Image: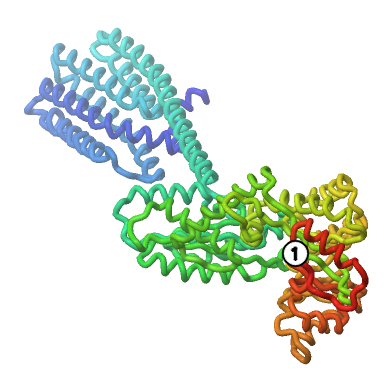
Amino acid sequence: MRGIASLFRLDAEDSELARAQFRSFSKQMPLLYLILICNCVAIMVDFFRPDHLFKTFCSPILMCAMALARALWWRRQDGASFTDAEIATHIRRTCTVAVLMTLAFQSWCMWVYGNGDAYARGHLSFFLALTQVSTVFCLMTMRAAAMRVAATSTLIFVIFFAGVDRGRMLVEAMVLCCVGLGMMVVTYRYNLDFSQLIMSQRDLHNRQVETEKLSEENRRIALTDALSGLPNRRELLSRLDRLEQDPGAAADSLAVVFIDLDGFKDINDAHGHQAGDTLIRSLSVRLRGICPRYATLARVGGDEFAVLIEAPGATAEATLLAQQINEEICLPVLVDRHVLQVGASIGIAGNADGPLRAHELLRRADTAMYHVKMHGKGEIAVYDTAFDQGRLRRMAIEHEIGKGLANNEFEVFYQPVVEAIGGKIVATEALIRWPHRPDGPLDPQQFIDIAEATGQILPLGLFVLERACRNIKPLGDVKLSVNVSPAQFRDPGFERQVAHVLEQTRFPPERLQFEITEGYLLAHPERAVRAIEAFKAMGMSIALDDFGTGFTSIHYLQSYGFSHIKIDKSLLSGLHPGSKSSLLVTGAINLACGLDMRVIAEGVETEEQADLLRAAGCHKLQGYLFGRPMPIADFVAAYRSSNVGQRKAPRRLAG
């Protein structure tokens, strides 16, 4: 019984199904009421009696008016917007009205049945059955309404026609009963299929929405940098592509600011990638906070950012923003109780000179940034056409360095280091030169900077070390001093490579000294200590180069265990008795001696400088006064000359 009762129960809880039923009704209900009106008018014509005006005219006219009103109301609802609650209310009302209208029509038909002849009564039963069938089929999308109408109309029809005219209509009543039951079965199955169709459409729609969300999420992930949450390089290029499709861009309406962090790799090496990631996230938040609404900030590489500016006067806006960005990046960041700080090299390019492809803006900004990177870092540069020529030249030299190593174009020159007292050559500094370059010799500083930036300093440094060890080994106890690049110290295989060179050349490690700069010590104190201890364990000595130009403290000097310090030649400028330079140099020498370190002064060019350094207690001297960097043959000759007798005063050597 519960199962049968559930067939007649109205369920409007499923809002999606209710909306589908409402949309169906808005199309079918006008037709249903039109059929009802037509049938009602047909019966009225057959049964009209002037003496029964209310019964045969007024009553059907009233039903037709109500049916017409309902038909017009439903006709206006096609495409109307209702809330779920309003739709549920209308459906409940329709379910009730459908039963009431059925009862009213059948009651009226039975009321006028006795007023007609046999022919008219046959018409009435036909129209009544037709109306019942039409009503049920128009209501099939709503099971409860269709089942209620079918059951009510069939039951009344069977009871009425089974008893009138002495049972003559019993057969028709039984047939209509069977038809009614069939309609109820069809209604149930149709409604089940209709409900399943709506649920399938809903599932399909939900899957489509989910697919669209997933697609949008995938697109967002593909165009967003996972670490910083900023647009990535692909999104920036996509934005530039869209801008390129607009040929009408006004002059000075676009600019690109290209930012490269200075010192970020050092932080990754010293503190780990987690610290580097934290720094990137912090900088991303801060940079996003200072970028205006017309600027698009993107992370385009590991330590590279770009800002696309779309505004009138874009180049000036970009320059002002670049200054703010530079100041913001230089602020320290606290990460795991470590204060981390980086700088920025920034390049700017705009379309102030006329139409320019958006991708060309990015390339020019990158070129301007690279120009800053190669000329001191930490600055801001606006693109100039000369930058391209400089970059092309650097790229050409980079290519030539690789070919030069393969073709044996490089040589090692040697600058003497003499005892302050006596002038005897006791050591030499190995310096790389490029004398056999096809386009002519190149100043070392020009190609060394490029080699540092490209990583080619690693094979160059090993070349110098191996060649110098082989050349200097026969010269008795002459010590060899070799400059070591920070890039070589960062190379995890550097210690193993040095050991291999010493093994292959059989050069005594106690005669080898590495020179490192203060900048590397301050940036990588822990790694520097480990490397210095490893080399000292091999028997080598370590000298601090360019002493006096940086910020090395007494604590650092004690921690690293240097055997020598080299006083930078800049401190020798203006060196004469009683000068401030004399006091600085004397103080530096006394400090080193107090820490049991030997002192070498480089850049000595005059006898006066040599005398003052000697009087201050300097142990070794190096400079043009005692010889310029020279090929190995000239150095051997100078070395042998310095050992012919013990001179009382130093003199200039050949070279």
Q: Residues within 10 Å of mark 1 (few under 14, many from 20)?
A: some
**Which residue is at a point 27% across and 31% down the rendered structure image?**
27
Task: Please indicate, yes or no, whether residue 7 appears anywhere in the rendered image.
Answer: yes
Outermost bottom residue: 578
> At which x and y percent is residue 414?
77, 61
Is 504 rendered above or below residue 328?
above
> In the rendered image of this protein, does residue 321 appear above or below residue 22?
below
551 and 150: which is toward the camera: 551
Q: Position of residue 6 (x, y in %)?
A: 48, 27
Can residue 542 be seen at all in this image of the molecule? no
Label 1 amino acid? Tyr
Quarter of the image for the C terminus: give it.
Answer: bottom right
Q: Nearer the viewer, residue 193 or 648?
A: 648
According to the image, label 1 marks what residue?
Answer: 520
In the displayed structure, 149 sits above or below 285; it is above
Q: Is residue 474 left or right of residue 339?
A: right
